[in-house]
Image (spheres, helix red, strand yellow):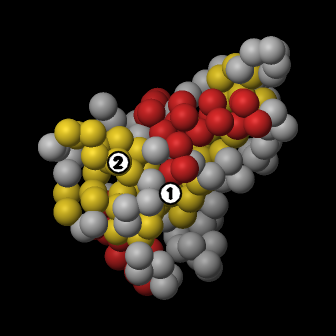
């Protein structure tokens, strides 16, 4: 198994596979968005573009681990990850960050997009307690995701909007 390589370069594309039809929505012909339920605040699993450079490759990795319904793909880069997310009245602010964590169950390209308190250098995931902040975090990250593939059909490049 590959050793973790952190930090992940901020311009590297990360691909997340999702169950078909559950976390992306078509607004108009050719225009898709990721919905907030595409984000797992326990740590959203992605595949690093360095080792998995295409959306098709991300789907093949998911299939190889038995996740055959995951045929929608979103992407994001580190530079697009939201920072300083605040949801008043709580003064707490949170940042998203990416962390390479290859393992036997997810593969060598596996990484996670996690949350931590702003100003923290921790690599552990800090899950906020406020349900309002949780909803805001999900929405903010989903807004930064680019829908790349829907049901195995490419709908966009892997670049962020």
Q: CA distance from mark 2 to mark 1?
A: 20 Å
Residue 54 % position (x, y): 29, 60
Q: Position of residue 40 (x, y in %)?
A: 62, 52
Image quadrant in which the C terminus is located: top left
* Residue neighbourhood size for the residue with mark 1, other residues' Cα within 10 Å, grouped as few (<14), some (14–19), many (≥20): many
User: As drawn, is 154 to the left or to the right of 101?
Assistant: left
84 with respect to 32 (left or right): right
Could you tell whether 30 is left or right of 143 in the image? Answer: left
Q: Nearer the viewer, residue 142 or 10?
A: 142
Q: Which residue is mark 2?
A: 25
- Asked if residue 9 shows in the view, the reply is no
Q: Residue at x 65, y 23 (%)?
A: 85
Q: Examine the rendered structure and indicate whether residue 1 appears above or below residue 115.
A: below
Label 2 vs 1, first from the N-terminus: 2
* Residue 70 seen in render: yes
Point 15% across, 43% down: residue:
29
| Residue at image mark 1 | 46
Between 100 and 15, the residue placed more toward the observer is 15
What residue sits 25% from the left and 67% below the top?
152
Residue in the image at 28% along x and 46% along y: 26
Circle nearer the viewer, 2 or 1: 2
- Secondary structure of the residue carrying tag 1 is strand
In the rendered structure, find residue 99 and report the number of the disc placed on it.
none
Q: Position of residue 13 (x, y in %)?
A: 39, 46
Element type where label 2 sits in the image: strand
Instruction: Please say if 131 is above or below 19.
Output: above
- Percent position of residue 9, x then y: 48, 40
Whether tag 2 and tag 1 are in contact, CB under 8 A, the answer is no
Disc 2 crowd, CA 10 A, few/some/many (<14, 14-19, 20+): some
| Outermost residue, left side | 29
């Amino acid at each position: 198994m590959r050793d973790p390589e952190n930090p992940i370069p901020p311009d590297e594309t990360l691909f997340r596979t999702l169950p078909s039809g559950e976390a992306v929505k078509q607004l108009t012909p050719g225009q898709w968005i990721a919905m907030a339920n595409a984000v797992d605040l326990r740590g959203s699993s992605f595949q690093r573009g360095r080792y998995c450079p295409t959306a098709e490759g991300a789907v093949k990795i998911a299939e190889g681990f038995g996740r055959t319904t995951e045929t929608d793909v979103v992407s994001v880069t580190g530079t697009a990850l939201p920072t300083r997310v605040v949801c008043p009245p709580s003064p707490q602010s949170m940042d998203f960050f990416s962390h390479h964590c290859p393992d036997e169950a997810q593969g060598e390209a596996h990484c996670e997009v996690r949350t931590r308190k702003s100003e923290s250098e921790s690599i552990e995931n800090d899950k906020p307690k406020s349900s309002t902040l949780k909803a805001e975090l999900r929405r903010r990250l989903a807004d930064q995701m680019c829908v790349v593939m829907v049901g195995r059909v490419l709908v966009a490049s892997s670049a962020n909007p």
